[in-house]
Amino acid sequence: MTFQPPSKSLTPRDYQFITLVAILFLIVSAALVSANLTLKHGGGDFYVHWVASRGFIFEKTDPYSGQIPARVQELVYGDAAKPGNEPYILDTPFHLLLLYFPFSLLSDPQLARAIYTLILELALFALALLSLRLTDWEVPRYFWILFLLYCVFNFYTFQAILSASPVILLGLAYAGILLALKNDQDELAGALTAVSLYYWEVGGLFLLLISWRAYREGRGRFFAGLGMLTIVLAAISFLLYPNWIIPYLRAGMNNLRADFGFSTHEVFRYFFSAQSNLIAWIFIGSLVIALGYEWSTALTADSRKFYWTACLSLAASPLLGFRTEMEHLAILVIPLAFIFSIVQDRWQRIGNGLAIMILLVGFFAPWAVFFLGLPRLGRTAEEILFLFLPLFTVLGLYWIRWWAIRPPRVWADLANRRSQIPNRNS
């Protein structure tokens, strides 16, 4: 008897299925774009790149000049920014601003934002899937749905979508970097790192840890992928705008001096009227020491410990005193997926319920503060909202640390596992 390999050609039923999926995708995308067109507020994180790109291409305007923030403020606020508002100063390197040039071809800002927001929504779906895949967890089907709903509707990702923040795309890139390194696709990891080299307050620590680990392990292909794409983009940028570095650095400094956003110092000032600065520095110093210790052990440890440390770096970054924004916390779906997976794996009998309970707390608590606390407490409620998710995630990571980085369980855990295995002779 001879066996013939299966045919590689698609059957009519395959074509029908592909056509149906494509039609459904187009219908959903069109519906999302239509819904996105109704968004009248926010969008400043996209508009600053769109206005800068369009001004450079069609008006030869310096993207780092003061004209760009003024135009973006008009789009977002309807007037000049008030004290405490984000001024929307462009501080993206010009070679990465090139990635926004296709959107500048659209003259309608609402349509350009709607299409960009559609990309963010699709990226958010992919980010949820990759975050769970990174955990090596046999995810129950119901939890796939719950986690996806959490990612789409939680307070922080909602803010990221409303402001059209690229942080969701950065999160997808970060998850892709971890997955690529895990699968020994070093060039891909390097290329994803190359397009992630901005918004340092979000992923600077994470990218530094990734690069340091790649160097220690002699992953030359990682740096080849990083270098090649960066060189190509930089070469194009210098051909288009040879002297962009000095204006870019000046705009970055102006953005650092601007008074907006959230930081650990500001949060502690609201909660500790006396010695708030000292308490904030003690908190930040303790966190830096903890990160230093974890980094020193992760650089030579196995991939599981490194993954945990990478998640900790993402979760701790908002707490290190750098000014950041609420929507930047959407990136923390990556470490949250890791926490859920360990909780379910560690406590077999109650793990599913415990993971769901933690997910529900992480979902409802911020919305409760927003709807119930914000009208009464004002800025104090905003500080609580900013502090909640990073602290929630850091504490969760340290709670699961033992079981996350030491897969061979202690004797009691192994005995518990054996007691749950049915006796084959019974």
Image (tube, grey):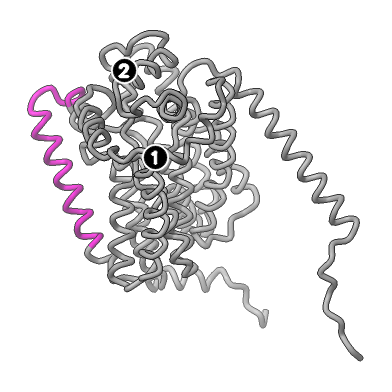
Drawn side of residue 197 relative to residue 371, left or right: left
Please name the predominant secondary structure of the magenta segment in the image: helix
Q: Which residues are magenta?
A: 269-295
60 in the magenta segment: no
Q: Earlier in the sequence, mark 2 or mark 1?
A: 2
Would you say the residues marked 2 and 1 are in contact, meaning their CB atoms lie under 8 Å apart? no
Q: Which residue is mark 1?
A: 240
Magenta segment includes 285: yes
Gap between marks 2 and 1 measured at Cα = 32 Å
Please give left or right for residue 347 compared with residue 238 in the image: right
For the residue marked with disc 2, what is the amino acid?
A: Asn
Disc 2: which residue: 85
- In percent of width and height, residue 409 lies at 40, 70
The image quarter containing residue 229 is bottom left
> Residue, x 69% and y 28% (percent of image)?
31
Q: Residue at x 16, y 53 (%)?
A: 289
SS category of the residue bearing label 2: loop
**In this rendering, is residue 66 above or below 28?**
above
Crowding near pointer 2: few (<14 within 10 Å), some, many (20+)?
some
| Place of residue 334 in the rendered image (x, y in percent of width and height, measured from the top left) | 44, 49
